[in-house]
Amino acid sequence: MLDQTDIRRIRTGFARIKCAPDALTRDFYERLFRAAPDVRPMFPDDIRRQAGKLQKMLALVVQTLDDLDALIPQLRALGARHVGYGTADAQYAVVGEVLIDTLAAHIPGWTDADRRAWTALYGLATAAALEGAAEARAAG
């Protein structure tokens, strides 16, 4: 779970990149496609719309840090949708590594404590998404 120090750290870091979220998400997808070229076909050629979705999801997660339980159903639904896109469970780890590295590159003053807080948050989000994916596969 995240403590108040982690939450404050995540929100402070996220506020530092709010003025340039497009740069963050473009960089994220460039890094992702280099790290995992096998996922590139899962995305449209024009990544701008997808980048906008990522921006909105990151903002929603950061806004909901005080009540992550309220976000769990949305994260489960996200995981279920990703089954339809052909996302393998193992790909969540690669996405997480790339996301954390991208955040580190874009948040001024990034520290090891920031990495731990964001990694913990991504772990919570991923657990919920994987639950949704497992439920979707079991259903059908």
Image (cartoon, rainbow, N blue to C red):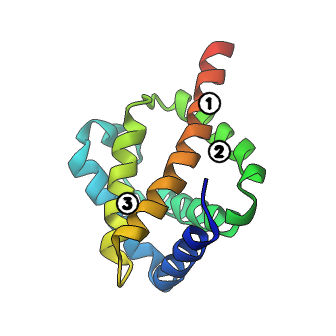
Measuring from the top left, give residue 124's x and y in whole percent.
Answer: 57, 47
Measuring from the top left, give residue 40's x and y in whole percent.
Answer: 32, 43
Q: Residue at x 64, y 31 (%)?
A: 132
Measuring from the top left, give residue 64's x and y in whole percent.
Answer: 71, 63
Name the side, left or right, on which 3 lies relative to 111. right
The type of residue carrying mark 2 is Leu
The type of residue carrying mark 3 is Ile
Q: Which mark is residue 131?
A: 1
Q: Is residue 30 visible?
A: yes
Q: Secondary structure at mark 2?
A: helix
In the rendered image, which residue does mark 2 sit on? 75
Compared to residue 93, the image places residue 80 above or below, namely above
Q: Which mark is residue 100?
A: 3
Q: Residue at x 42, y 28 (%)?
A: 88
Q: How many marks?
A: 3
Query: Mark 1 packing: few (<14 Cα in 10 Å), some, or many (20+)?
Result: some
First along the sequence among labels 3 and 2: 2
The type of residue carrying mark 1 is Glu
Measured in 3D between alpha carbons, the distance from the residue under mark 1 to the one under mark 2, in whole angstroms, is 9 Å
Q: Residue at x 62, y 64 (%)?
A: 3
